[in-house]
Every structure is written in C-alpha cells, then in structure tokens.
Image (cartoon, rainbow, N blue to C red):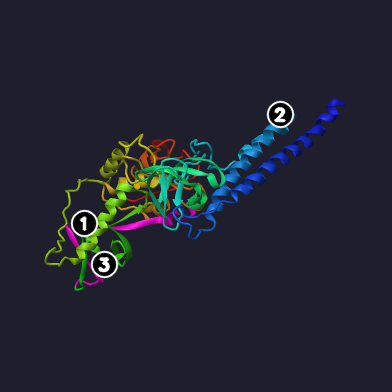
Amino acid sequence: MKRRLFPLLIPCLTVALWGSNLTALESFGAEAGLVQSVSEESSAGTKQGMGQMTARDLLNSQMDAGADAIADAMTQAAGDATGDASAQAADSSSSTVEIEEGGTPLSAGPVDDEYSNLAIADVDNYVNVRSTPDTNGEVMGKMYDGSVAQVLSTTGSGEDAWFQVVSGDVQGYIKAEFFLYGEEAAAVIDDYVTKYAKVKADRLNVRQSPDIEASRIGYLDNGEKAKLLENDGEWMKVEYADGQAGWVAGEYVTIEEEFLHAKSIAEEQAELEAQRKAAARAAQSEAAAPEDTTITVSAPASYSTNEELRSSIVEYAKQFLGNSYRSGGRSLESGTDCSGFTCYLFAEFGYSLSRTPQGQWTSNGRSISAEEAQPGDIVCYSSNGSKCTHVALYLGDGQIIHSANSRRGVVIDSIYYDDTYIGVKNVID
C-alpha cells in the first residue's frame, strides 16, 4: 500500500512547491515592477523601459533559482531517473549571463564574448558613481549617457539592485536601473563607439567652413583629439570645444574609435579647463598663433618582410599575458577587452582597426580560412550566430592570444577553444 501511495504523493508535492514559489515570484514581480529609470539627480522626466529590463533580468534570475529548488525537491522525493532528468533540465535552462546577488562576482557564462559583463549607461544626462551601494555613498565620478562599464558584481534586487562597476579609472556603485545590460547592450554597442580626429600636425586650424579661405575659429595642437561629427575625406567637421564645431583638413588627422567612460571628479575638472582654453583660442588671431602643419613622427620600425612584421606583432602581444580584462578599456597595460586588445596592438604598428568585434569582422582586412591563417591574423567568434562578439590574435600552430574575459584576462588558447569560431581576418597583406 505504501509503495502505491508514494508515487501519488509526488504530483501533490510538486503542485505545493510550485504554489509556494509562484507566490514568492508574484511578490518579487510586484516589487520589481516599481523600478523606474528616473535620474538620480533630478525628478524631471523618465526613460521608460530601462528599469523594466533590469527588473526582468533579475526576475528571470529568481525564476531560475525557483525552478532549481523545485527540481531538487522532486529529485529527493522520487529518488529516480525522472528526478535526475528534471534537475538537469532546470540547470540547462539557466541564462548564460547570470546576475548573482550579495556582491558576488558575475558569471561570464560558458562563452567568452565581448559583452558578457558589459553595461551601457542609459540616462538623460549623467548618473553618479558612488563609493557604496546607496545614495549616501561618496561620489567617485559620473557616468554620462552612453558611457560603458564592466559590471563586477551586483547587490540587492528590484528597485534596490546596484551594480558594482569599473569604467575608465572610476570604480564604484550605480543603481542597475540606469544601465542597458547583457543582450540589450550587445545589440546596440556598435552605436556607442565615438570617433575622434587626432591631430598629427604640430598645430592645425579649425575653420568655420570646409575651405582653406574660411575664417579660423580656433586651433588644435599635436596629439589633441576632437569628436568627429562629419567626414567627407578632404575635410572633417569636429567638435573642438564644448558645443562648438568647425572643420579641419583631413590630411593632418588620423581617425580613432573609443568608448565613453566614467569621469572622475579630477578628470571632469581637467576637461572643463581644457574646454575653456579651447574656447579662448577663438579670440587669438591667426597671426598670433599661426598654423603649423609640420608632422613630427618617430622613425618607424623597418621590416624587410611581412613575416618579420607578423612575428613582431606576436611577440609584442605576448608581453601582455596575464594582464587584466576591462570592458571598454583603453590600455594594453592597465586592461582592455578583446577588440581593444587587437585594436591597440595593431595601432602600435601603424594600423587603424575598428574598436568593436563586429567592426573588425565586417570592416577590417579580408576574410581567409583557418587553413590560410598566419601569425598576426585576427580570429573571430560569434556567441549568438548573428554578429561577431569576440576576437583574438592568431599566434600560429593553432593557438591564439586574447583578452578572454574578466575571470581569465589575457591568455593563450587553442583557436578552437570555443565552438563559436566563425572566421579569420587578414589585415596585413
């Protein structure tokens, strides 16, 4: 009799467990539904949808946890293969990018792609980065709309969820509702790359219109960068001071791609001072500060063959083994992401590459097969099947070096370390 009754108890136990978990989930959903993306600094206006997305991600995390608990209970009650299969099914339903609570590190999932822990600020103007996960924390810096960050951990849930982030030289906490994160961020990341015109002349005039006879409205010195607004090849329209635009001769600048980052208090003060000086240049006559289009360059390294160049790129890359991964990072030394790693490596050898994996896949070099790959080529991967989400530098002998993710940093792997391989790009010859 007991053996016949026991199987009948399993469905009842399952229904009871589902009922208790659904009650908890409904309560959580009501709490998460209160999340709204309202500027921390002002109550004027809202950005609809962002808070709901973050709440939904956290709700999915809670639902996964609930499913796991139910599967575990069924396994213990039944003690047979059916319970084991239910537990495995619950495990396999987990998201590849998990948001864990309590300040623990985020999982990058089974696929090492560029966007595992990437977040993009989605605010009206800016949001403060604070020293602690509450509005009483010290302001460490500001993240302006469109700035990118690497999410280190999360704490809290619903409207009290906070991300611990690092962006540029700023690290701290921001409410999760102010970010695009995960798949939402990956879908739009290429729209958040900012192009700059970097001056290679000793001094370059900024003119009112794209004509050598046009009035000068300012100037830029060697190494200065101005946001690129338009590019017709011969002339480029740039924002040379805050809110002020003009034109520079294209032959005296190079184009660079970067992400926006958080600004520390000191960095913002320095930037405001630089903008003040740039605006003051408009008052100087061209005679007082004449244009100097002399281009001073260091003698480039000489390579007798492409093989020698490729070998030099590979050896240069290896010196960064073990360095940290940082989403949107700008430095090989202090840390960058996968596309930053290849972009900045090639920049040292005079090549200008896109700042994103998709950009390198679609816009740089020519496509070749894995059998044709040579040391110094770029190997591309796609975790979603629709766009390139990760890139690496080919070392030869079936190996790559890449800035893998926040857990591993810069490492050497097999070219087929991941089954998301999609192709190779030759940018050298």
| Amino acid type, residue under disc 1 in the picture | Lys
Q: Secondary structure at mark 3?
A: strand
Q: Specify which label sits upstream in the sequence, 1 or 3.
A: 1
Q: Secondary structure at mark 2?
A: helix
Q: Residue at x 16, y 54 (%)?
A: 296
Residue beneath label 1, please?
Answer: 200
Q: Using the numbered discs, state the Cα–Cα distance from disc 1 to disc 3 in whole angstroms.
A: 15 Å
Residue range of the region highlighted in magenta in the rendering? 186-212
Q: Position of residue 235 (x, y in %)?
A: 26, 67
Q: Is residue 372 visible?
A: no
Q: Work out whether 199 lies above or below 7.
A: below
Farthest residue toward the bottom? Answer: 213
Q: Is residue 409 visible?
A: yes
Relative depth, front residue between 144 and 232: 144
Badge 3 vs badge 2, beta-carbon distance below 8 Å: no
Q: Using the numbered discs, state the Cα–Cα distance from disc 2 to disc 1 in whole angstroms.
A: 70 Å
Q: Which quadrant of the figure contains the N terminus?
A: top right
| Amino acid type, residue under disc 2 in the picture | Gln
Asked whether residue 207 is drawn in magenta, I would say yes
Give the left or right position of residue 199, taking residue 371 as reference.
Answer: left
Residue 76, disc:
2
Q: Position of residue 395 (x, y in %)?
A: 35, 39
Which is in the foreground here, disc 2 or disc 1? 2
Farthest residue toward the left? Answer: 287
Relative depth, front residue between 112 and 236: 236
Q: Bin the neighbour count of mark 1 within 10 Å (Cα to Cα): few under 14, some 14-19, many 20 and up.
A: many
Q: Secondary structure at mark 1?
A: loop
Farthest residue toward the right? Answer: 1
Quarter of image, res 277: bottom left
Asked whether residue 33 is drawn in magenta, I would say no
Residue beneath label 3, please?
Answer: 247
